[in-house]
Image (cartoon, rainbow, N blue to C red):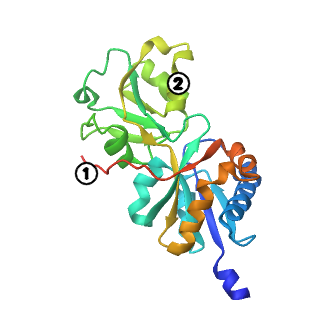
Amino acid sequence: MGLLFAASLATLVFCAPGYPGGAADAQPLLNQFAIAAAADAGWPPGSLVAVYDPTEAGGLAKLGDPAAALAFVPYPFYVEHAQKLHLMPLVQADMTDLGVQQRWSLVAKAGRVTSPASLAGYSVLSTAGYAPDFVRRNALAGWPLPADVKIESTGQILSALRRAAGGESVAVLLDQTQAAALPSLPFAADLQVVTQSAQLPVALIAVVDSRVPAARARVLQQGLLKMSHAAGGTDALAPLLLRGFVLPQLPTSKPPQ
């Protein structure tokens, strides 16, 4: 039984590139979530553990470990790495402040960008800049970027917006929370939302490279779906700004531009 139990251990890797937060601060919350998720799925106590990494490189390194059976990642990360990591969506996150979907907004200096072609020579800065496929194929699917546009990752969104407002050849791709704060900026009048994405998933949990057997994954999926209604579930979800989970509702993949 000892060997059987050890083989059933699974690690859930939380990875959120571009967003603030340290592993030490997050770990107690992740431990609470892992315990509650395993209990709701009927998994043995201690059979699910969770770790966190705030960087793309660190998250990929952790997901390369054979024990990393599950990934909790933002949708841009999923789009960028799903094929390489063989990610199979299990559930989609229902976020406290956003719900299950959000729109991304491309912001530039007011009056400067009137069409995709006018972005020639620009850089697009975003917390999702580490995922250029997501930026081009999803967030800006209806706004085909010129080939020479550089897509760059940044966690310094306020600085990027100042650069755009100051007239640099910079556009900033904002998530829905960041875009909602735009009108409060003292230089907001110098900026303009030039296009928005369709509604896109915020985040999801996926099985990595079939490391969770299908039957066991289905049990976990059902446990996650009922977590918001289970005893202790809300207490484990709320600190992570989660209301619960729904079945995956992913958009149809678009071909590269």
* Identity, as a three-letter code, of the amino acid under mark 1: Pro
Across and down, in percent, residue 29 comes to 74, 51
Q: Secondary structure at mark 1?
A: loop
Which numbered disc covers residue 180? 2
The disc, 2 or 1, on the residue closer to the chain's N-terminal end is: 2
Q: Which residue is mark 1?
A: 255
Q: Please say whether residue 107 is visible from this viewpoint.
A: yes
* Residue nearest the observer in this picture, 29 or 219: 219
Specify the quadrant of the image occupied by residue 143: top left
* Identity, as a three-letter code, of the amino acid under mark 2: Ala
Q: Please say whether residue 211 is visible from this viewpoint.
A: no
Which numbered disc covers residue 241? none
Looking at the image, residue 122 lies above or below residue 137: above
The reply, left or right, for residue 25 in relation to residue 203 is right
Looking at the image, residue 31 lies above or below residue 144: below
The reply, left or right, for residue 160 in relation to residue 234 is left
Q: Could you tell me which residue is drawn at 53 percent across and 24 percent down?
A: 180
The crowding category of the residue bearing disc 1, from other C-alpha atoms within 10 Å (few below 14, some 14 to 19, many at least 20), is few
Q: Could you tell me which residue is drawn at 53 percent across and 29 percent down?
A: 178
Q: Which quadrant is the N terminus positioned in?
A: bottom right
* CA separation in Å, label 2 and label 1: 30 Å
Q: Could you tell me which residue is drawn at 66 percent across and 53 percent down?
A: 227
Across and down, in percent, residue 177 comes to 54, 31
Q: Secondary structure at mark 2?
A: helix
Specify the quadrant of the image occupied by residue 38: bottom right
